[in-house]
Image (cartoon, helix red, strand yellow):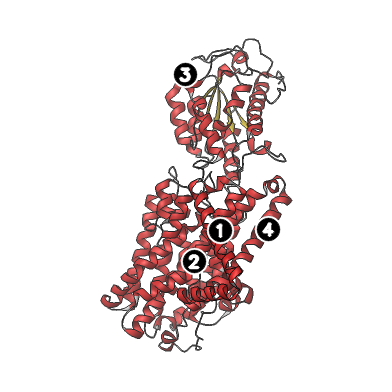
Amino acid sequence: MDMSVDSPSLGAAASRSRPAPVRPAGRLPGLDGLRAVAILAVLAFHLDPRWLPGGFLGVDVFFVISGFLITTLLVREHDRAGRIDLLGFWTRRARRLLPALLVLVPSVILLARLVEADLLVGIRRQALGALTFTSNWLEIAAGSDYFHSTAPQLLMNLWSLAVEEQFYLVWPLVALVLLRVAPSSRARAAVAVALALGSAVLMATRYDPALGATRVYYGTDTHLMGLMLGAALAFAWAAPHRAWTSTPGWERARRPLLAGSGLVLVALFALLDESTPWTFRGGILAASLATTLLVLGVVERPGALRSVLDRPVLRWVGERSYGLYLWHWPVILIVEADLPWAARSADGYLWSRVWCVVVTVAIADLSYRLLETPVRERGFRGSARHLLHTIRYAGTRTARAVWAGVVVLAVVLATVLLTVPTRTSVEQLLDANSAAAQPSSSPAVPASSRGASPTPGASASPSRKPAPVAQTWAMPTGAEIDGYGDSMMVGSVHALRYYFPGIRLDARSNRQWAEGLSVVTKRGDANRRAVVLALGTNAGTDLERARATLDALGPDRMVVVVTLHGRINRIAGDNAALRELVAGRDNVAMADWDAALEGTTGQLQSDGMHPSLVGAHLYAKTIRQAFADLSTRHTGQPVTLKELPVP
């Protein structure tokens, strides 16, 4: 996203307003600091969502700042020249955005190929979106999920850059019409506010928790409110005299309003997350409104807010925010893939995150000083001439080596793009297992399951009537178990059949509780006397449907509910909700997959979510232990579980 927009001095506008210090030309004090706050929030969220659940709202802070600055530049040019040089405007945007982007895309593709080929799945689409500023729409069409993606997307963060660039292409035309047609700055601001509210309403009404947030979060039409609120402030700020900033009411409200806006933004960063419907039904709008007031507080006059945000360290970070945003996400993915051992301990994980920050800051600083600033000052032609002159000055041998290196890198890049995998290794495993995870693939049923001492009287076939307690609560055989699950169960299908021969599985990737309820209800009395439920990893626990699923199974079946695992912020809350739901049901036990993974190594695939071949056996044994505990709870008879060798 364009975080390097120059802050106009606003000198012309300031001269028409209430007395205020003359602002120097160049960047507006304080806004770089606000950019720094935004990029630090986004960085914390992407390093680990648990650190700052609502850190993704930093993107909306950038949107407001960009909307304000771009519209201010357009208004100033129109006031000064009576026109807007659209070609000049778009050329300046290209100078700011393209140099770093054109270095980023090939660099991270080549680095990712050296480290982990899985990172390149879908990279042709992502690179096309990055270079045409259509990433958001291409990812929507591809069914990508920003918050719950199980496959890494190397250029996922560029969706917001696409939204801003689409804004830069269209908004100057709209602003030009408003400047010529709308009778006053107030009317222009009202149009921008109406567009912001319309976008917020679209986001709120089109958001469906069952379908995920991708469409409303990525969509330019549904995520326009921050840009439009910034534009509205620019129109209002450009109004002659700005009498509203001199009223006694504003003087009384100014400090508490700005302090409240800061507190609201911090609270939203800390409390909102992607699983909260209110994030998309007012939360993003609230963050945008709070940011708009903070921008006003920064530009309106010198004060404590501007003083804090204009500190050198924040200004330094803000100036490099574009490079930090571009590079941080690919760096995180590449470091994770290159240092898989780091996730095995808390200390290793923390140090890997520190290393991500160090690498990102170093690259962003080099990009800012050696690439972005020179191109911005010299232009594309001037920069090209300077580069060619430098190469020629270095001597013929060096020049030949440089051009040979460029050709080799181009050939390697083309080869990589032509040979990238279409599926990650995890997806290939799930594809291979998917057929075996369907009911029709269940093998013939043996009399008893492996690894458990048979209990006298245990039934080998489901019964439509409640069975006697001794029969109902005995350790079930595989022939007596139904398994309903998502990709965690699909990835563990062979281990489940190993420990529970004859188990009937009905699992598929991305299955949520709504579909699980439908399948369980459809099967009705044909459900076996023991059931495993492992649903909702991607979208979370739908308590209403989870409760309805348990109700549909009734109190006479043995039911095991498997907890979720992942570094998604909501996992702890989802598991707590599941435990609370299970606690009041005597026939239900928890298989705590999340707890079983604590302190272990090698149990997960490279995505940090799905079980590895070894982890699949731990997954199955965790379920087996839950059934044994449930049986013992009701019969009072310990269940002896045989330790089977992992094949």
Foreground disc of the pair 2, 3: 2
Amino acid type, callout 2: Phe
Foreground disc of the pair 1, 4: 1
Residue for point 46% across, 80% down: 8
Q: Nearer the viewer, residue 23 or 98?
A: 98
Residue 335 in percent (x, y) is at 64, 53
- SS at circle 4: helix
Foreground disc of the pair 3, 4: 4
In the rendering, which numbered label is found on residue 107? 1
Within the image, what quadrant is residue 574 found in?
top right
Which comes sooner in the sequence, label 1 or label 4?
Answer: 1
Determine the residue located farthest toward the left in the rendered image.
181
Residue 571 in percent (x, y) is at 59, 44
Amino acid type, callout 4: Trp
Amino acid type, callout 3: Ala
Which comes sooner in the sequence, label 2 or label 3?
Answer: 2
Give the CA separation, mark 3 to mark 4.
54 Å
In the rendering, which numbered label is found on residue 526? 3
